[in-house]
């Protein structure tokens, strides 16, 4: 299958790796992933898709497989991935599948899965089982074929998300929103109801992504947004990824805000209403995030990278909120699932409430010098991690995800990518000088960055 079964989802080139035959086979096999809790919610799986040209045929083949395997399908059509999660919880379905390749280029596609209540399906929760069934062609059809129904959740989803919006104060915010020609485009009616002065970029659904890659984690993809914010004098910029489960923010100066710092800001906003709650952050995040959560009366919880781990731990600890450096934001009151639009709502609430600028909100938590994630192509990933452990054995080391080494004045994490052939480095220090020195040191061990 060309390695399309990943830690969190199925993803690959269309049609060489992922095609209608594979989608149909996955659909047939999906029933084996449904656990006892899923079955208590019935027999229906929510299916939706993004705007890629091959998403519709893949979706049709997937539904053929699901119904052939005896499951009923609620087809909600074009939808964002957070809408799929919401639909699973809202409709009390047994599970859900979104056809999307998220931020990947146009020639990719994929499948994202969830259990009932939008619980994650991941490498630790059944994707290897799916892969084994498909590879071995252990795909018997059910005696009784399932039924397919058409559904619609946009209105209910909109009411749910907008219920968290505080009443607009006298200040009217100007916000530039870049949908990257992806599924965030369909949020326009909801954005219009938020009482904002909107300036829109790339709101035409186009799976070829003609303007820029739909990945807001790469700074070059925020260039147009930053420029428009500066030109227009906007208060805020927002960029969604391809399936609109991630969002990145740009301040009024056109400067990108690290999603770890956005996590801290949203955590502070939520903790002001419900102090003492656990808040999750992924281990790539700035130390300032944990510090700020504590300062706001929350309980910081460090977690490994990946939506499946974040969601599972957030649910286990009944945390109020969690965020990742990649721009995923998870909310307890959203079935513990990620919802980028709800993150936008909370940032808007915060700006309105504080009556200040985004840069002023960020400044107190931009406490350290930090790199973005830097990729290295390494043949022996585990060998390189062992080498790092030996070189920095005087630091505080843990292996929650790859290797993290911490000192008083700097720290780094190196982890194997779950989706690409890379080791990924992120590091932080108390000063720019210390960061530059340690960065050069680590490059000497890891080699030349891949991008």
Image: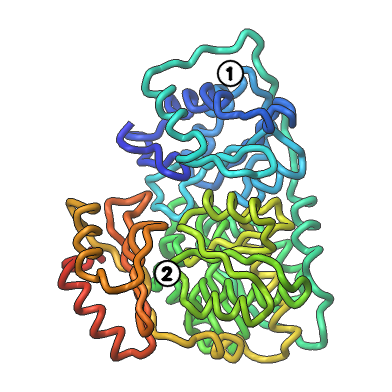
Q: Alpha-carbon neighbours of circle 2 within 10 Å: few (<14), some, or many (≥20)?
A: some
x%, y% of residue 3? 33, 37
Q: How is the image coloured?
A: rainbow
Front-most of residues 161 and 34: 34
- Label 1 SS: loop
Q: Which residue is mark 1?
A: 69
x%, y% of residue 4? 37, 38
Question: What is the quadrant of the N terminus in the image?
Answer: top left
Q: Is residue 252 visible?
A: no
Say if 122 sits above or below 342 in the image.
Answer: above
Say if 389 sits above or below 103 in the image.
Answer: below
Front-most of residues 72 and 191: 72
First in residue order: circle 2 vs circle 1: 1
x%, y% of residue 83? 66, 49
User: Relative to 293, is 371 on the left or the right?
Assistant: left
Residue at the far front in the pictured view:
394
Q: Is residue 130 visible?
A: yes
Say if 353 sits above or below 404 in the image.
Answer: below
x%, y% of residue 303? 50, 60
Q: Which residue is mark 2?
A: 221
- Which residue occupies 78% across, 74% down? 273
- Which residue occupies 34% across, 66% down? 397
Which of the 4 quarters of the picture holds residue 120?
A: top right
- Label 2 SS: helix
Front-most of residues 17 and 32: 32
Which of the 4 quarters of the picture holds residue 403?
A: bottom left
Camera-near label (2 vs 1) is 1
How far is the residue under mark 2 from the one under mark 1?
Answer: 41 Å
Give the label on residue 367, or none.
none
Front-most of residues 64 and 91: 91
- Which residue occupies 44% across, 57% down? 209
Which of the 4 quarters of the picture holds residue 323?
A: bottom right
């Amino acid at each position: 299958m060309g390695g399309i079964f990943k830690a969190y989802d199925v993803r690959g080139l269309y049609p060489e790796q992922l095609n209608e035959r594979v989608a149909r086979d996955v659909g047939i096999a999906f029933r084996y992933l449904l656990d006892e809790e899923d079955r208590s919610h019935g027999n229906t799986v929510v299916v939706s898709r993004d705007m890629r040209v091959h998403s519709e045929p893949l979706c049709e083949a997937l539904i053929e497989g699901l119904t052939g395997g005896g499951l009923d399908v609620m087809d909600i059509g074009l939808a964002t991935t957070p809408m799929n999660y919401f639909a699973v919880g809202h409709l009390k379905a047994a599970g859900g599948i979104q056809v999307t390749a998220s931020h990947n280029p146009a020639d990719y596609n994929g499948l994202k899965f969830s259990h009932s209540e939008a619980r994650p399906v991941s490498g630790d929760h059944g994707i290897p089982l799916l892969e084994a069934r498909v590879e071995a062609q252990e795909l018997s059809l059910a005696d009784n074929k399932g039924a397919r129904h058409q559904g619609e959740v946009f209105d209910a989803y909109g009411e749910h998300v907008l219920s968290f919006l505080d009443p607009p104060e006298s200040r009217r915010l100007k916000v530039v929103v870049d949908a990257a020609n992806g599924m965030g485009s369909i949020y326009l009616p909801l954005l219009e109801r938020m009482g904002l002065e909107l300036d829109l970029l790339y709101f035409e659904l186009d799976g070829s992504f003609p303007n820029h890659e739909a990945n807001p984690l790469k700074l070059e993809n925020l260039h147009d947004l930053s420029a428009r914010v500066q030109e227009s004098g906007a208060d805020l910029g927002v960029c969604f990824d391809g399936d609109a489960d991630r969002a990145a923010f740009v301040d009024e100066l056109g400067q990108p805000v690290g999603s770890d710092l956005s996590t801290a800001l949203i955590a502070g906003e939520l903790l002001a209403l419900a102090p003492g709650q656990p808040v999750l952050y992924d281990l790539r995040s700035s130390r300032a995030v944990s510090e700020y959560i504590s300062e706001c009366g929350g309980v910081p919880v460090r977690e490994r990278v990946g939506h499946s781990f974040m969601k599972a731990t957030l649910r286990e600890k009944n945390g109020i909120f969690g965020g990742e450096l990649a721009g995923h934001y998870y909310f307890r009151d959203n079935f513990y699932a990620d919802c980028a639009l709800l993150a936008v709502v909370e940032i808007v609430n915060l700006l309105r409430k504080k009556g200040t600028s985004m840069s002023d909100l960020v400044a107190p938590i931009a406490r350290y010098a930090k790199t973005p994630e830097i990729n290295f192509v390494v043949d022996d990933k585990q060998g390189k991690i062992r080498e790092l452990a030996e070189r920095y054995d005087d630091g505080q080391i843990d292996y929650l995800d790859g290797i993290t080494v911490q000192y008083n004045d700097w720290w780094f994490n190196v982890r194997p990518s779950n989706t690409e052939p890379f080791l990924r480095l992120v590091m932080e220090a108390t000063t720019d000088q210390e960061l530059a020195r340690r960065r050069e040191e680590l490059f000497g061990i890891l080699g030349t960055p891949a991008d």
